[in-house]
Image: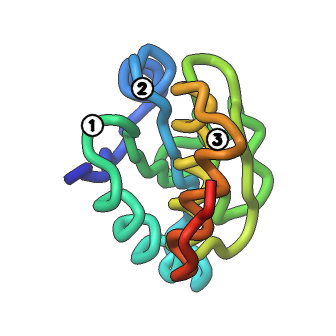
Amino acid sequence: MSDVIEINGREHFEQEIIAADVPCVVNFWSPGCASCVANDHDFEGAAKDFSDEVRFASVNVHTNQEVAQAMRIRRVPTVVIFRGTAVFDVRSGRCTQKNITRMAQRVLDKENNVGLLTRLKRFLNSHGRKAWF
């Protein structure tokens, strides 16, 4: 089970996210933002779906303004997937657990060179259909 890391400062962000040896899903949020509070519950739920293969972290943009400015976060909530210094995916606004899980799965598929047929089989199986191939 993956725990959500609370990022505290630019150095901590660089250690936990930029220097990580796994993809990182980062939730940029703000206290007092209703969408951020709703996102937080789904973000934590998605983190439980992945073990050590994906890191989940949370960044409060008020207490980490330097990080938010460096990442050019203009709107909260914003979910960003990093692989080292590269940004793999970005979603601004409300994200459901299903959306966050799909984002994380896409980066894992890319990392592991998972092809179209495997992704199609997974999709069909998740919708109660058996793939014939």
Q: Is residue 42 above or below residue 29?
A: below
Q: Are marks 2 and 1 in contact (CB under 8 Å)?
A: yes
Identify the image quadrant of residue 107: top right
Front residue of this view, candidates 133 and 27 = 133
Q: Secondary structure at mark 1?
A: loop
Tell me if 13 is positioned left or right of 116 in this view: left
Residue 64 is situated, as x and y percent measured from the top left of the image, at 51, 42
For the residues labelled 1 and 3, the Cα–Cα distance comes to 25 Å
- Secondary structure beneath dot 3 equals helix
* Residue named by callout 1: 52
Cα distance in 3D space between marks 2 and 3: 21 Å
Q: Residues within 10 Å of mark 3 (few under 14, many from 20)?
A: some
Residue 68 is labelled as: 3
Alpha carbon distance from label 2 to label 1: 8 Å
State the residue at coordinates (24%, 51%). 3
User: Measuring 54% from the left and 48% from the top, which residue is drawn there?
Assistant: 104
Of the numbered discs in the image, which one, if any, rests on residue 115? none
Note whether 7 is above or below 130 in the view shown. above
Instruction: Specify few, some or many for label 2: CA neighbours under 10 Å numbering under 14, 14-19, or 20 or more.
Output: some
